[in-house]
Image: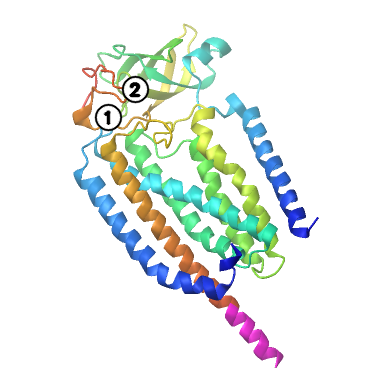
Amino acid sequence: MKAKHQRLTLAVLALVALVGAGVLAAFALQDRANYFYTPADIVAKQPAAGQAIRLGGMVEEGSIRHEADGVTVNFIVQDGTARQAVMYTGITPDLFVEGSGVVADGKLTSDGTFIADSLLAKHDENYVPRELEGIDMTGNMTKTDTLVE
Amino acid sequence: MHAYANPTRFLSLARPLTPWLLFGGMALVLVACAWGILSTPPERLQGESVKIIFVHVPMAWLGMAGWTGIAIASISELIWRHPLASHAARAIAVPGALFALLCLVTGAIWGRPAWGTWWVWDGRLTSMLVLFFLYLAYIVLANETSKTSGQSRIAAIFGVVGIVNLPIIRFSVEWWETQHQGTSISITGKSTIDALYLWPLLVSAIGFSLLFAAIVLMRMRASLAETKVEGRLKRMAAE
């Protein structure tokens, strides 16, 4: 075996081991590297009331309800399988709209409501010009009357 | 590969190619940014702030492509002892680090209006920051090891090891729940970004790639010239 071939074999073996180790490590991290809990995770893991958690999901259509004080907002976060009621007091980001993604830091109260201390909008991978809204990428018509400008 | 291993032959190709890449890249970037910023409509939810995508995404792609380049050069140095490889890997590191940094900065500027925050520690943002730190570590390591001796292999091994981070960046948004949105552009499937944004983005990406290549060629030429001068000084000292 020539020295060049020896080095080639060694490098290929090292690369395979390296990428394998990386994938195994990423796989082992799994849900610990998740940035937030989905409502389904909250159902499955039952975090204790008062424990600081981060919740992420979609704002349910028609669920946003503004309180009389003008700064408190109640809404429901859903992920297709579970729903979670959320209360937040403060200024909401511009992209906080029904049907869009949201990430909230906060804690669950004993009655099961999630009290958010901070609210971030999470936009999805769709980039659609304003004049084309209503026609989504899969060709289906989407509900647009709840979107704010 | 070894046809261009001869530095003289490489230089005869790199020298005329550099201005074409440099000015071609500048022209394409200017056209793409003017097109993207002035003539595309505001996005449905994000409005005008979406237009930073024409800089942010090419920076992210090239930041990752740069490390791919370092890894390829490092492998050809380790296995085939390609004489230009250590020059190439070192030449890529600085623009690679710069593009990764610009990706982080433009991402923060975009994140503030779109998400409501400059920075979060999610899988995508954190792994991209790690890439930037890997570049800095590589630059330090490369500067401390001579590029013409066997020492250079230490930097080359680091260049290969760092490749582990690339699939983590790419798949972070699929493996984990992240603040960052998922992948919009697909070569095989359907892209979820409207063609009105996609085309200027692709032109911008090509333009920035040519600029990146021009920077790498200029740095390689400077690096080869430096080695030549060092060799000449050594010979003069020996006489």
Vertical relation: A149 (above or below) B149: above
Residue located 49% across and 55% down the image: B96
Lateral position of residue A50 relative to residue B239, left or right: left
Pointer 2 local density, CA inside 10 Å: few below 14, some 14–19, many at least 20? some
In front of the other: A103 or A29: A29
Mark 1 neighbour class, 10 Å CA radius: few under 14, some 14 to 19, many 20 or more: many
SS for dot 2: loop
Residue matched to label 1: B45
Q: Chain of mark 1?
A: B
Residue A105 position, x and y percent, is 45, 24
What mark, if any, has residue A100 been given in the picture? 2
Q: Where does the C terminus of chain B fall, quadrant-wise?
A: bottom right
**Chain that bears disc 2:** A
Task: State whether the magenta stretch is mostly helix, strand or loop.
Answer: helix
**Which quadrant holds residue B213?**
bottom left
- Marks 1/2 in contact by CB < 8 Å: the verdict is yes
Provide the residue span drawn in magenta.
B228-239
Asked whether, in this view, residue A36 is left or right of residue B156, the answer is: left
| Residue that protrudes farthest toward the bottom in the picture | B239
Whether residue B106 can be seen here: no
Q: Residue at x 39, y 60 (%)?
A: B211
Q: Quadrant of the N terminus of chain B?
A: bottom right
Depth check: give the residue in front, B212 or B93.
B212
User: Is residue B163 in the magenta section?
Assistant: no
Three-letter residue code for mark 2? Ser
Which residue lies at the image location 42% right of the left edge and 37% below the top edge? B187
Q: Amino acid at mark 1?
A: Leu
Q: In terms of image quadrants, where is residue B79?
A: bottom right
